[in-house]
Amino acid sequence: MSVRVRFAPSPTGNLHVGSLRDALFKFLHARHEGGVNLLRIEDTDRTRYSAESEAEFIETLKWVGITFDEGPHIGGPNAPYRQSERKAAGIYEGHIQTLLAAGHAYKAFETPEELTLMREYQQINRLPTGYFGGDWRDATAAQVAEAERAGKAFVIRQRIPRDTTIAIEDAIRGRIEWDSNTVDDPVLIKGDGMPTYHFAAMVDDHLMGITHIGRGEEWISSAPKHAVLFDQFGWQRPVFIHYPVILGTDRKKLSKRHGATRVLDYRAQGFLPAAILNFVALIGWSPGEDREVMKREDLIAAFDIDGLQPSSGIFDIEKLRWMNGVYIRETPLDDLVKILTEYVCDPVALQYLADPGEEKAAARVDVLPQLAMLRKGLAEQPEYAKAAIGLEQERVHTLTDFGEATAFFFVEEPEMDEKAVSKWFPQPQVPELFDHLIERFSSVQTSSSEWCEMLVRDYAEKKGFEKLGPVVHPIRVALTGKTVGPGLFELMSVLGPERMVGRLTRARAMVR
RNA sequence: GGCCCGGUCGUCUAGUGGUUAGGAUGCCGCCCUUUCAAGGCGGAGGUCGCGGGUUCAAGUCCCGUCCGGGCUACCA
C-alpha cells in the first residue's frame, strides 16, 4: 500500500518552526516513497480558529516548497479538508452512532463544574486525574433516557476497556504500553456537537486512507485512546510516528525568547527557505552519514523513517546562520539579485525589522535605512547594485546583512570609521598617494580591476614599498570608510573612476 | 501525585557488543592574502547522565537511580 500522510494543523496562530519540521518530515516521507501528502485543517475548536492563520500556514508552506497533493486550497478526492466542513457534511455523526450502538461510547451528563470538583477531589487524594467512569459510564438505559428527557447537556465519551494492556507500536520508539486503567475516557463529541481531535482526526485519517500518523511527541499520551478507537471501529491501525520536539536554548519549549518561533519571522530576518528546510530537517533526523548540506531534492532522496531520532533537539540559530551563508554563496548571482530585490521590497519583512515585537534580540532597526538604499540602488542602478552584491555574496550570513555590507556603495560620502582614519591617514605616503590616484582616475572613463591592480602595484613598487598594505589600506579607508570588505581592486573596479575621485578628494581634504 | 517519553563534545548528530568514540557548528591557532570573509590545515572540547550487573569485551544488552520533557481540558 502506498504511503499516505497528512499535515493536519490547527490554525490558531502562527506557523512555527516545530510545526514546519513536522510538515517537512511528512512531505519528505511521502515524496521519498512516491506517496501522497495531504493538508487537512483541524478547526473543530471554533473559538480558537482563525482564517488569517490558515492563510499564513498555506503561504508559509508554499514559500518553503512543501507541496501537497490534496488539501483545502487545491481540493482532492477526499474533500472537504476542513473539519468544520466535514462536520457540516455529517461525516462524524454516522460514526459516533456506530460507536454508541456498539457500546464503545456513551453519553455523560456531568456539568463542567462537576468535572472540576471531581478533578479537585482526585488531586487532593493523589489519584490519577481524569474521567474513569463518573456517573455515566455504567449508567442504565433508563437513567440516560431520563437525563435526555430532562434536556440535560451531555458529551459523548469513548469507553476505554478496563483491566487490560493497551500497546502501540511507535515507528521511532518501538512498543509502548499502558495499563488501560490509567487511560481515562476522552470526550469524543463536545456539548456543542463538535467532535474533538481524538475523534475527528482518527475518523478522518481512516477515511482519507492515512497510512502513517506523524505528530509531535506530546501526543504519545493520547495514542492509546486513538489506537483503541481504530480497534473499536474494526479499522486497521495506521503506523504512529511521534516526532521529538524542538527546544529553545534553555531546554524549554522553543519560544520567542530565543529569537523567533514564527517561520515568516525567519524570512523577515533574511533566511533562505532552502536553508531553513535543510537546517530544520536535521533536528531529529539524520541521513546516517556525515552529510549536512542537503537541498530539498537531496533530503527527499535520503529521507527514511529509520533516521528519525527519539530525543528532542535544541534550535541553534548560529548553525542556521552558517548554513544560510552556505546557501547564499551557492546561489547564482542573477537569482540572488532577484531574491534580494523581493526581500528589500517585502512589506512584511520591513515591518518585522522595524518592529520585531517581543523579539528584541532580533531587532535590526538600524538596518532599515541601509536596506532602503539597496532597494533604491537595485531599482536605479541595477548593474552597479548587482556587482556590489556579487562582491559581498561570500561574506554575509543573511539577506539582511547585505544592507550593511553594501551600504558604502550607495552613499555619496561613506561614514568614516574613526579608528581606521587615525591609523592610516596620518602616514607620510598618504597625501601623495591620494593625489596620484585622483590625477589618474580623473583622466579615465572606466577602470578594470586588472588596471587598478597594476596601477597600485606599480605605484607601491616605485615608492619602494615591499608590501602592499601601506598603500592598499589607506585607499580602502578613503573609498569605503572601513578596514574590512571585498578585495580592493574588485571594489575599485565596481566603484568606477568618478566615485573614486570624489571619495579620494574628500579623503585628501581630511589629510592635510 | 499518576502515567508516558528521553539522556553521546556547548549545540546538531554518527554509532545496533570489539572504533585512538567519527562528522558538523561554535571557539582558538596556522596557511592563503591588501583587510574581512570564503577556502585549506590543525587544536581544545566527550569519564557516552550516574550506579550496579551480563560478557573475554558495553555508548551499544539488563536492572536501579538521577535529571530533563510531555500528558493529566467539552485545546489541539
Image (tube, coloured by chain):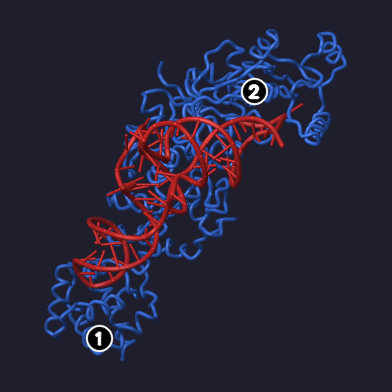
Chain colours: A blue, B red
The residue lying at 68 percent from left, 25 percent from top is A182
Please name the residue that numbered disc 1 is placed on. A430
The reply to whether residue A287 is visible in this rendering is no
Instruction: Report the number of numbered marks.
Output: 2
Say whether residue A197 is left or right of residue A434. Answer: right
Nearer to us of marks 1 and 2 is 2
The numbered mark, 1 or 2, whose residue comes first in the sequence reads 2
* A305, above or below A90, in the image: below
* A26, above or below A233, in the image: below
Which chain is mark 2 on? Answer: A
- Quadrant of the image occupied by residue A168: top right
How would you rate the neighbour count of disc 1 (Cα within 10 Å): few for under 14, some for 14-19, many for 20 or more?
many
Q: Quadrant of the N terminus of chain A?
A: top left
Residue A78 x, y percent position in the rendering: 51, 18
Residue closest to the eye, A362 or B54: B54
Say whether residue A427 is left or right of residue A7. Answer: left
Tell me the kind of residue under disc 1: Val
Tell me the kind of residue under disc 2: Asp
Mark 1 lies on a secondary structure that is helix
Residue A237 x, y percent position in the rendering: 53, 17
Please name the residue that numbered disc 2 is placed on. A179
Residue A135 x, y percent position in the rendering: 82, 19
Mark 2 lies on a secondary structure that is strand
